[in-house]
Image: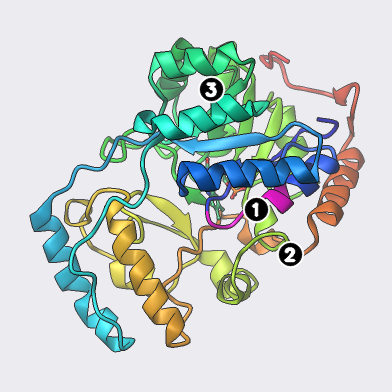
Amino acid sequence: MSVPIIQAPMAGTSTPALAAAVCEAGGLGSIAIGAVAAAEAEQMISRARSLTDRPFNVNVFCHRPARPNPAVEAAWINRLTERYHAFGGRPPAELREIYTSFIVDDAMLEVILRQRPSVVSFHFGLPPAAVVAALRAIGTVLLSTVTSVAEAELARVVGVDALVAQGYEAGGHRGVFDPDAADDRLTTAALVRLLVQRQPLPVIAAGGVMDGAGIAAMLSLGAAAVQMGTAFIGCPESTADAGFRNALASDAAFHTTMTRVISGRPARCLPNAFTGWGEGIASADVPDYPIAYDAGKALNAAAKAAGDFGYGAQWAGQGAPLARALPAAELMRALAQELSDAGWRPDAGMASTPSGTQR
Ligand SMILES: Cc1cc2nc3c(=O)[nH]c(=O)nc-3n(C[C@H](O)[C@H](O)[C@H](O)COP(=O)(O)O)c2cc1C
C-alpha cells in the first residue's frame, strides 16, 4: 500500500472492479463475500485477480449462526404483511437464514485456502482458533473489526495481525461480536486512542472518515491506516442503485440512523420508509440476523418493483453528506492529494503525532 487507505468491504455494494481500482491506485481494495455462497465468492476473487496483480482483502462474516424462533418470525411476517400488500406483493410463508456464517462454512474456508488472498478480514466476531491457524499457515494477513477494548483483546488472543476499530458513526452493520450485549457506542476517535494506548496491534480507523483531512486526523491519533466505506458508495464501480445514490445525495445523508429492523443486527443507514416504520420496535421482536434480512430483502424487492426505493438497505455512515460521486481512481487521487496537503508523506507519515502514540 502506498496510501494508508483500505476500501471497506461492502456486501451487496462493493465489487471486484471497485476493489481492483483502489488497489491499482495504491490502497487496499476489499472483496465482500459475507453475503454470498462459496462458488460466487470464488468467482469474485478470480474477477479481482483478473483486474489487478496487487494484494487485496477478502472479508467474511463471523456471526453466531442464527437462532430460529418460529413465534418471533411468524409475528414479524404478520407485522410486515400490510407493507407487502401495499406494494402488491405477498409476504414470504417463512423466513430463512439466508447467509451461512464463516465460522461454520467449510466450503468457504476451502475457497479461501485455495485462493490464498493476501489479506482476510473478519466482521461480527472471530472464527475458531483452528481456522485462524489454517489461514495463518498460508501466510494471509488477518484483520478483525472490533468496537471495544474487550473485543480487541479477543482478536489479539486468537492471533489477528491488525484491528479495524469501528466507531459508532460508521456506515453499515455494527461489527459488535454480540448484538444483544450492552454497547458503549464508542466513537472512532475514542476507540482508536484506547486501542493505540492499550494493546500492541496496529489499529485501522473505520467510521466517519471521508476525506484527506479525516484520514490525517486518524493517523495523527496513532492509526496505521483507515478503512472507508461510505466514501466509496458513490463510485460508478459500486452496485448502489439509483435510489441509494439519490438518497446519499439528499438531505437524508445528514440524518443517518442505527436500526436492526432491516437485517436483524444493528446497522447505520440513511433514514427511509423502512427505518421510519421500524422506530420503537423492541430488539426482542426482531428475528435473529440474517433471518430478518430475508423479510427485509423481500419487502425491498416488492417496493422496488412498485417504484418505491424506501425499503432498501441503504447503509451509510455519519459522514455521508461528504460523499463524492467519483470514479474510484479519481477519488483515490483526490484523497491522496488531500492527505499530502494535510502534511502526510509516504515515507515519513504525519509530520507530528501526539505523545502516547505508539507508531
Ligand atoms: C454499504 C456498506 C456496506 C458494508 N458492508 C460491510 C461488509 O460486508 N463487511 C464489513 O466488514 N464491513 C462492512 N461495512 C462497514 C465497513 O467495513 C466500515 O466499518 C464502515 O464503512 C466505516 O464507516 P464509514 O462508512 O463511515 O466509512 C459496510 C459499510 C457500508 C457503508
Compared with residue 322, is residue 35 higher up or lower down, i.e. above or below? above
Q: Nearer the viewer, mark 3 or mark 2?
A: 2
Provide residue 328's location: percent of width, then percent of height. 79, 54
- Judging depth in this view, the residue of 5 and 84 nearest the camera is 84
Q: Given this view, does label 1 or label 2 mark the residue nearer the observer? A: 1
Kindly identify the amino acid type of the residue bearing the numbered disc 3. Answer: Leu
Residue beneath disc 2: 236
**What span is colored magenta in the figure?**
12-19
Disc 2 crowd rating (10 Å Cα; few below 14, some 14-19, many 20+) is some
Residue at 73% x, 52% y: name it. 17
Horizontal placement of 99 versus 243: left or right? Answer: left
Earlier sequence position, callout 3 versus callout 1: 1
Name which residue lies at 85% across and 31% down.
Answer: 2
User: Can you identify the residue that label 3 sits on?
Assistant: 194
Q: Quadrant of residue 114?
A: top right
The amino acid type, in three-letter code, at marker 1 is Thr
Magenta run includes residue 68: no
User: Dot 3, crowdedness within 10 Å: few (<14), some or many (≥20)?
Assistant: some
> Earlier along the polypeptide chain: callout 3 or callout 2?
3
Q: Say which quarter of the image contains residue 242.
A: bottom right
| Residue 34, position as x, y percentages in the image | 47, 43
Marks 1 and 2 in Cβ contact (< 8 Å):
no
- Is residue 95 placed above or below 145 in the rendered structure? below
Residue at the farthest left position: 71
Q: Position of residue 136 (x, y in %)?
A: 56, 14
On residue 15, which mark appears?
Answer: 1
Q: Are marks 3 and 1 in contact (CB under 8 Å)?
A: no
